[in-house]
Amino acid sequence: MMKKISSFLFVLSALALIVAACAPAVATEAPVAPTEAPAADPMAMYAPDAVTGDIISAGSSTVFPLSERMAELFQNEGYTGNITVDSIGSGAGYERFCKTGETDISNASRAIKDSEVENCKAIGREPLEFRVGTDALTVVISTQNDFVTALTKEQLAKIFTAQYTKWNEVDPAFPAEAILVYGPGADSGTFDYFNEEVVAPFYLNQDGKADVAAGKTALLAAKGAQFSEDDNVLVQGVAGSKYAIGYFGFAYYNENKSTLKAVAVDGVEPSQATVDDGTYPISRPLFIYSDAKIMKDKPQVAAFIYFYLNNLDANIKDVGYFPAPADAEKAAMDAWMAAVSK
């Protein structure tokens, strides 16, 4: 009997060893930590589809096509709020931004003046400048005009102040026909720039410096000149007559090449190359302005400006303007970052 029990115990022990050998090994390593989630994008809060509310901008007719393009793209990317872009001239735009405080963004084809900065401060605003591009102010004639190809600054100054009233006074080879003059109104930054760069240098003050006030008076007093803040009105006026001449931003010329011709100024035609190398004599910077408090109180305004600055290079040439220098683009983005970080 004892022999049978011993045999049974031996078999049982053997089976236990076999089961132990076949059992899975127990893990002895430390548990692996779960993978960390990727860091959130700090700019996600400024995505077009992440903001809503109204955005109101107004100002330069020159900057208008660019701001209008950016507004359309911003909405296409998911912004569901209301965005307004009004073309009323740089001066009138600064009035709305700095005096009445009606707008969130001011579009401008000239830098803000000290007096306008003071107006802004009086209503608690600190204007913040963003360079958005470069314009080649373009002197235009109708495609019907078969006698003008180039004019000097002096000739332009005399044409637009009515010192020349017939084309043959500009050049005896030109026809003895009355010159029809079209230009932006006095609220326009384009008017201011043309006066400062083309007209005022021929009206010197007692110190021998360009007299901007005298130039402005001469431009506005030109008999028969037609003024408008709407550049499309100027386009139609110039295109409609063989003997007309006008000036406005390059984008409006670019849109109407089928009916308009650009006049070379001092022998240089407006183009990307002549703007970049500084040889075109009447190119100028383009801006938008806002305020850090507005951008903090209205995230949709900050989001729109961020979108605007990031999409310039892909759109500005198509609109008809030229990119700002790289350092100016960086300064604009740095200004934006500083504003939203306050």
Image (cartoon, helix red, strand yellow):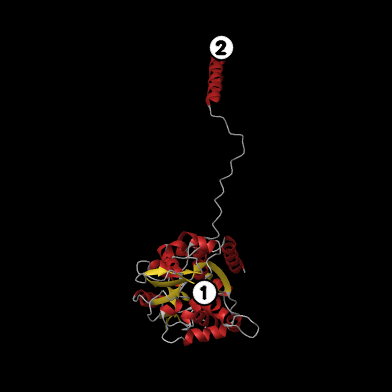
Q: Amino acid at mark 2?
A: Lys
Location of residue 243 (image quadrant): bottom left
- Report x, y in % for residue 94: 52, 80
Q: Is 316 displayed left or right of 143 in the figure?
A: right
- Report x, y in % for residue 163: 48, 83
Q: Is residue 147 among what the camera can see?
A: yes
**Residue name at image x 56 percent, y 85 percent:** 213
**Residue name at image x 47 percent, y 87 percent:** 221
- Report x, y in % for residue 160: 47, 80
Element marked by disc 1? helix
Name the N-terminal-most of marks 1 and 2: 2
**Residue name at image x 51 percent, y 62 percent:** 274
Residue located beneath label 2 in the image:
3
Location of residue 327 (image quadrant): bottom right
Determine which of the numbered discs, if any, sits on residue 153 in the image: 1
Determine which of the numbered discs, if any, sits on residue 290 in the image: none
